[in-house]
Image: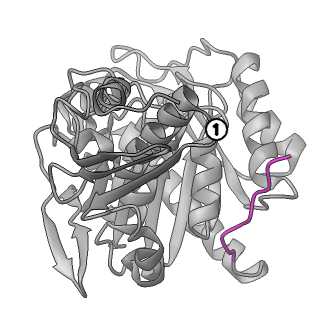
Amino acid sequence: MNLSVDGVKQILRRIVHPETGKDIVAMEMVQELNVGESKVSFVLKLSKKVDPFASAIKKMATKALIDEYGDNIQVDIAIVADTAERVSVLKEKASVSRVKNIIAVASGKGGVGKSTVAVNLAVAVAKTGAKVGLIDADIYGPSIPKMFNMEHAKPEVKKEDGMELIIPVENYGVKMLSIGFFVDPGNALIWRGPMATNALKQLIHQGAWNDLDYLFIDMPPGTSDIHLTLVQEVAVTGAVIVSTPQDVALADAIKGISMFTSDNIKVPVLGLVENMAWFTPAELPNNKYYIFGKEGCKKLAERMRLPLLGQIPIVQSICEGGDSGEPVATGTSIVAEAFDKLARNVIEQVGIRNRDLPPTSAVNVKHK
């Protein structure tokens, strides 16, 4: 085993910080490097108080050194202002524990308008007077900042009981946090799984959520480590599944339902939302054109004995609202009324779920 300071630095230069695109040696994050006969130790110095990637970078550096020098090498990395080590403490004191209902908004397939539904659902529920929060857990493609016209917002950090908490950004009555607030929107997000899941943990446990009636989680499409991390970290009250009426989307929606209701997870599905249910042109407001098929979600809901929470049409104003950062649910149009109805149905189903089923708890997912 030929250990040397220069050799170790060369290996650590392969570890790139996802936010800056620079390697950790160039960023001068590697401090007090000591190299012995079979041991490497150094301090990983964070460049700012809150770094969602600290734990993941530590793991990647450890793995890179072991892969290069073998399992006999001892790697000792200390993190200055270690955010990762505080997560366990934060879980005990985190304000997310005071949130009454945590609701995952998910889809089996990408491109069905899940984030659009999550944003407008959160806004519509806030319009009822409820205290609402929203986490953008679509770590690889965060879109919530743009859809709320908050792309340039930078959440502040405060200390409370010796812990650093991230103050959510607020607009349209909704408190929100997204990894998009902490990265350059022009850079591609190329992260390994542990980095993404650690980022989600910090949005959950270090968010200053305080007393919320509803915290919506905009999940990435499909079923992934992010989904497993969510149900392991917090007690999810229920899931809302979004799909279009077409068969290929419905097939993936079934997989999403199956994941949440599996024996290992057991998160109740509150119901389905049929997005892009029909197209209505502005000049013919009474006409409905079923571009992706008719009532596919409604039929699936009936077959699986789940509530159909709402049907949202394709209307140009929905797209324009997402692009301009003014969600269509803030208005009084027919589409806004559809989201208001969806909000009422979700609130009703949450009430039924809490009345008829025992409280949820974070689950222990075992990988086989």
Task: Identify the residue under disc 1.
Answer: 224
**Residue at the image point whose x is 74% and y is 51% from the top:** 260
Q: Nearer the viewer, residue 338 or 28?
A: 28
- Tell me if residue 96 comes above or below residue 44 in the rendering: below
Secondary structure found at label 1: loop
The verdict on residue 364 being magenta is: yes
Q: Nearer the viewer, residue 178 or 7?
A: 7
Q: Is residue 152 left or right of residue 67?
A: left
Q: Position of residue 32 (x, y in %)?
A: 22, 51
Q: Is residue 106 left or right of residue 75?
A: right
Label total for image: 1
**Residue at the image point whose x is 41% and y is 84% from the top:** 93
Q: Main secondary structure of the magenta part?
A: loop
**Residue at the image point whose x is 41% and y is 67% from the top:** 85
Q: Nearer the viewer, residue 163 or 33?
A: 33
- Tell me if residue 78 comes above or below residue 310 in the rendering: below
Chosen colour scheme: one colour
The verdict on residue 246 being magenta is: no
Q: Quadrant of residue 325?
A: top left
Label 1: few (<14), some (14–19) or many (≥20) C-alpha neighbours in 10 Å: few
- Tell me if residue 353 comes above or below residue 192 in the rendering: below
Q: Amino acid at mark 1?
A: Ser
Q: What is the magenta range?
A: 360-368
Residue 99 in view, yes or no: no
Residue 66 in view, yes or no: yes
Q: Position of residue 159 (x, y in %)?
A: 17, 78
